[in-house]
């Protein structure tokens, strides 16, 4: 009589083995991610112990390179935060910044290596402001011409347009400046600030930081403290609500583009005076690195973009500058893009960001 | 009965018999003209001295790139996944051609129906087989790239594919010393790759079939081979478009969440789009390499990906005929049109502007103006046009409602 009930109890409840897979997968993915991070940390520590002087100087160089990525990355993040658009043309706005700097500083003001004192610093300041203003206007123009009409179109449309704008901007540089490198004599003083062992840390690297940090601080102030910044943040949060509150959404978006463009201009200026050369297709690589930086930090998050920029700068320099088992400069791009893919797979929200990757 | 028929929403789903008949007639006429084009060119048109008419090698390039456009159309046009790294599959196909049809791996001597001279060291497979292997291998790479990335949406997917499109050329450039093994011959690339051909045996039996197309006076046979590939790609496009899979792609393109809720397996469907797109990319890349007999990492820039994307956009995303036309048009412009236009321009204005140098400026302007003015492309697919103008229609409907009667 009771056998039926007994057999029913004896039959083990079917364990849905496959149902475990997603949960396991989440853990597995995390485990792999932590393992990779630990591996990188270990590699860094071994390198630091083996040759700490080289390690420090390479790290400081990374800070300088990272500054440039940070400046450009913020432009991506500002625009993405407000429009959810990857502004592909941003990298080329950056190259325009470098090119305009060359025109102002070298062609118009005639700076040379010999320049010093007021003529050097005054001209550099003019170049900085000129590049920033030009790129701000350029970026706003790009938005006005190419993106505004597509604000309600399917998402792919503005993205494709952005790619087109990127090609137009970079090739327009070729039209005006040619396909070859535009270069200059070294303008910044390269004498040593201090020595670590027998390695010198030059003034030019410090000057890059001295330009970048105030620019970042100013950006932070504009976004956090001013009415314009507030309007921009409100628009990013909820465009319709912002409009109902009386914010001119179009102007707020334009402002975001202008702000990002100005920072890209500063970045272009810094790049040109530090590396002393630039070419029409410069923006492609820098733009991709900066975009990676923005994603790394959590796209839409300004502090994250700056942080991501510095991390990319460190990766680039550690990879090419360290001696113990570094893949070498030939692999830098692959490493950065691998990182991008890994982040998007493991932690799409980035280091500081909220979850955005699955928003459609 | 108040149900709305599909016809009321998007017009006739299937063309009327007469229209279908007419369409097929046009297709057959165009196909015939394309097939006999080399004959026309050699016998009649080559006397008409003009540099506007596509030469045989241009015609081959047009056909091969059209295959790539059709391949990318599966991904971008049908499934709505923006792929900016399509050049990766071109590269894969190209290198498979090199690995299996040149002296790259001189350590071994394998010859299975190769068209090169007998007894050459290295691997020499039959070139037709190589194309198939290249396509399948690229499809595999497509799956490998797709599985981690296709969970991402829209622009994130775009940027990741772009990353892959950059990693693969760099891998190729640095692949001459992978733990001491020379896989890709670095930035020199692979040279001396066997050409496509019918092989000596067939050549002996049927004398008009050339043993190796590379020994022919011009690229006529290559053009015919590529045209065959175009035909296959168009056939696959049409068959798959009207299949269950094709409808699943469209559903995902229009609304991924809704498609998932309706039971469309998202990952599998998207991966299949990727796989099939990669398949044709690899086949076309392989064929281009077999025709030029060499390949190098310089050929695989982002610009190629964008160029192929342009074909899809210009022609009309999702429409096979549109993409074929757009692809042919752009490839023609790229191979010959810009040079011809530049020469004419310079002759007329007595100037010396290198117009082809600025090709990407022109493509950029093309992309932007098409997206702004005619996002549905030259020959739009009816459904895609509806999607692209959805917002406008809604606004107009709202306006009509609010307008005073």
Image (tube, coloured by chain):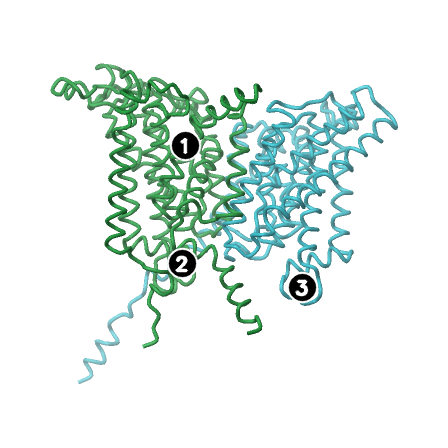
Q: CA distance from mark 3 to mark 2?
A: 39 Å
Q: Position of residue B128 (x, y in %)?
A: 24, 29
Q: Is residue B178 visible?
A: no
Residue A22, labelled with which disc? 2
**Quadrant in the picture for the N terminus of chain B:** bottom left
Colour green, chain: B
Q: Earlier in the sequence, mark 3 or mark 2?
A: 2
Q: In the depicted view, which residue is nearer to us: B348 or B106?
A: B348
Local secondary structure at mark 3: helix
Q: Chain of mark 3?
A: A
Q: Chain of mark 2?
A: A
Q: In the depicted view, which residue is nearer to us: B42 or A334?
A: B42
Q: Nearer the viewer, mark 1 or mark 3?
A: 1
> Which residue is labeled 1 in the image?
B331
**Relative to B349, B177 lies left or right:** left
> Which residue is labeled 3 in the image?
A242
Q: Nearer the viewer, mark 1 or mark 2?
A: 1
What residue is drawn where x is 27% and y is 41%? B27
**Relative to A335, A106 lies left or right:** right
For this orientation, the residue located farthest to the right is A118
**Quadrant in the picture for the C terminus of chain B:** bottom right
In the rendered structure, the colour chosen for chain A is: cyan
Local secondary structure at mark 1: helix
Residue density around tag 2, few if under 14, some if 14–19, many if 20 or more, within 10 Å: few
Q: CA distance from mark 1 to mark 3?
A: 46 Å
Q: In the depicted view, which residue is nearer to us: A136 or A222?
A: A136
The reply to whether the C-beta atoms of the residues labelled 1 and 2 are less than 8 Å apart is: no
What residue is drawn where x is 35% and y is 23%? B57
Residue density around tag 1, few if under 14, some if 14–19, many if 20 or more, within 10 Å: many
């Amino acid at each position: 009589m009771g056998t039926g009930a007994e057999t029913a109890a004896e039959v083990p409840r079917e364990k849905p083995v496959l149902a475990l897979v997603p949960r396991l997968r989440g853990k597995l993915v995390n485990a792999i991610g932590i393992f990779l991070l630990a591996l990188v940390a270990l590699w860094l520590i071994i390198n630091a112990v083996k040759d700490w002087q080289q390690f420090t100087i390479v790290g400081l160089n990374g800070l300088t390179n990272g500054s440039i990525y940070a400046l450009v990355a913020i432009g991506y993040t500002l625009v993405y935060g407000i429009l959810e658009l990857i502004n592909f043309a941003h990298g080329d706005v950056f190259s325009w910044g470098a090119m305009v700097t060359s025109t102002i500083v070298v062609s118009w003001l005639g700076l040379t290596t010999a320049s010093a004192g007021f003529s050097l610093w005054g001209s550099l300041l003019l170049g900085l402001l000129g590049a920033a203003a030009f790129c701000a206007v350029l970026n706003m123009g790009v938005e006005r011409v190419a993106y505004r009409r597509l604000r309600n179109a399917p998402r792919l449309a503005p993205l494709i347009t952005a790619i087109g704008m990127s090609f137009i901007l970079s090739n327009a540089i070729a039209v005006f400046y040619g396909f070859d490198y535009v270069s200059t004599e070294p303008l910044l003083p390269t004498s040593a600030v201090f020595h670590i062992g027998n390695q010198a840390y030059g003034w030019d690297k410090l000057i890059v930081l001295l330009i970048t940090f105030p620019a970042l601080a100013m950006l932070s102030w504009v976004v956090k403290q001013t009415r314009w910044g507030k309007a921009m943040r409100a628009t990013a949060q909820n465009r319709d609500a912002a409009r109902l509150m009386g914010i001119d959404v179009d102007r707020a978006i334009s402002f975001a583009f202008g702000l990002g463009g100005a920072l890209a201009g500063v970045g272009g200026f810094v790049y040109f005076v530090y590396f002393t050369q630039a070419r029409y297709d410069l923006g492609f690589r820098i733009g991709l690195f900066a975009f990676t930086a923005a994603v790394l930090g959590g796209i839409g998050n300004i502090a994250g973009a700056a942080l991501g920029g510095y991390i990319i700068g460190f990766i680039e320099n550690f990879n090419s500058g360290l001696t113990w088992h570094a893949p070498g400069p030939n692999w830098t791009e692959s490493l950065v893009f691998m990182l991008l893919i890994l982040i998007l797979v493991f932690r799409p929200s980035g280091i500081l960001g909220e979850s955005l990757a699955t928003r459609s | 009965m108040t149900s709305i028929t599909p016809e009321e929403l998007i017009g006739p789903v299937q063309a009327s018999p007469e229209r279908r008949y007419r369409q097929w007639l046009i297709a057959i006429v165009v196909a015939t003209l394309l097939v006999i084009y080399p004959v026309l060119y050699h016998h009649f048109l080559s006397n008409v001295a003009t540099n506007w008419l596509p030469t045989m090698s241009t015609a081959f390039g047009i056909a091969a790139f059209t295959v790539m456009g059709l391949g990318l159309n599966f991904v971008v046009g049908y499934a709505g996944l923006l792929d900016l790294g399509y050049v990766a599959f071109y590269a894969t196909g190209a290198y498979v051609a090199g690995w299996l049809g040149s002296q790259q791996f001189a350590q071994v001597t394998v010859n299975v129906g190769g068209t090169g001279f007998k007894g050459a060291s290295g691997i020499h497979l039959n070139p037709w087989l190589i194309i198939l292997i290249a396509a399948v291998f690229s499809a595999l790479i497509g799956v490998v790239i797709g599985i981690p990335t296709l969970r991402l949406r829209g622009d994130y997917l775009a940027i990741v594919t772009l990353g892959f499109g950059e990693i693969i050329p760099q891998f190729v450039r640095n692949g001459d010393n992978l733990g001491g093994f020379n896989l890709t011959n670095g930035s020199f690339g692979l040279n001396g790759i066997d050409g496509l051909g019918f092989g000596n045996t067939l050549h002996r039996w049927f004398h008009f079939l050339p043993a190796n197309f590379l020994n022919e006076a011009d690229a006529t046979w290559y053009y015919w081979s590529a045209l065959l590939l175009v035909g296959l790609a168009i056939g696959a496009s049409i068959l798959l478009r009207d299949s269950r899979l094709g409808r699943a792609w469209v559903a995902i393109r229009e609304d991924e969440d809704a498609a998932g809720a309706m039971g469309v397996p998202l990952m599998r469907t998207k991966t299949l789009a990727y796989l099939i797109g990669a398949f044709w990319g690899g086949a076309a890349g392989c064929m281009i390499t077999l025709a030029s007999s060499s390949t190098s990492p310089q050929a695989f820039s982002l610009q190629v990906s964008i160029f192929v994307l342009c074909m899809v956009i210009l022609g009309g995303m999702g429409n096979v005929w549109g993409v074929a036309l757009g692809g042919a048009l752009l490839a023609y412009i790229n191979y010959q049109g810009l040079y011809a236009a530049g020469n004419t321009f310079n002759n007329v204005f007595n100037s010396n502007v290198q117009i082809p140098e600025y090709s990407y400026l022109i493509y950029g302007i093309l992309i932007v103006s098409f997206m702004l003015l005619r996002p549905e492309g030259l020959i739009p697919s009816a459904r895609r046009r509806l999607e692209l103008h959805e917002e406008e229609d809604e606004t107009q409907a709202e306006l009509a409602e609010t307008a005073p009667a």
